[in-house]
Image (cartoon, helix red, strand yellow):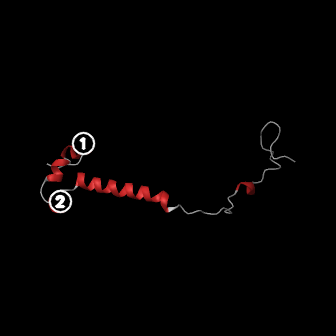
Amino acid sequence: MALFQPGGTLDPQEFQMSDTTFHPDGVVTPIPVREILPWLIFGALMLLAIYFVGAEEGATAIVPGMYVHEWVHDSRHLLGFPCH
């Protein structure tokens, strides 16, 4: 007996609800480091860029003076960071 009828519909006598349950018989494969590493580097660079654009001035400054602040000043306004 076929599960599908000729018209393309399910045959209620053949279809069991237990046929649609999840059976975890697959193997979980780990993601290789070579695929994760570029995203980690990208994320770290973006966090560093957000720090320099958003917080590099005053008490949290890594670079002394206002050099970085002036260099990213327009970016701060474009991204909505207040600076003065």
Where disc 1 sits, the SS reads helix
User: Could you tell whether 44 is left or right of 74 in the image?
Assistant: right
Camera-nearest residue between 59 and 45? 45
Q: CA distance from mark 1 to mark 2?
A: 22 Å
Rate crowding at label 2 as few (under 14), some (14 to 19) or many (20 or more) other CA atoms within 10 Å.
few
Where disc 2 sits, the SS reads loop
Rate crowding at label 1 as few (under 14), some (14 to 19) or many (20 or more) other CA atoms within 10 Å.
few
State the residue at coordinates (14%, 60%). Answer: 64
Which residue position is annotated with label 1? 78
User: Could you tell whether 51 is left or right of 41 in the image?
Assistant: left
Camera-nearest residue between 39 and 16? 39
The circle on residue 66 is none
Q: Position of residue 10 (x, y in %)?
A: 78, 44
Q: Indicate the amino acid at tag 1.
A: Leu
State the residue at coordinates (12%, 57%). Answer: 65
Q: Indicate the amino acid at tag 2.
A: Val
Task: Please report whichever mark, 1 or 2, sits nearer to the chain's N-terminal start.
Answer: 2
Q: Position of residue 21 (x, y in %)?
A: 69, 57
Q: Position of residue 84 (x, y in %)?
A: 13, 48
Q: Position of residue 32 (x, y in %)?
A: 52, 61
Q: Which mark is nearer the camera, 1 or 2?
A: 2
Query: Residue 62 occupies which quadrant of the picture?
Result: bottom left
In the image, residue 74 sits, relative to residue 60, either above or below, namely above
State the residue at coordinates (67%, 59%). Answer: 22
Identity of the residue furthest to the top in this view: 7
State the residue at coordinates (38%, 57%). Answer: 41
Identity of the residue furthest to the right in this view: 1
Which residue position is annotated with label 2? 63
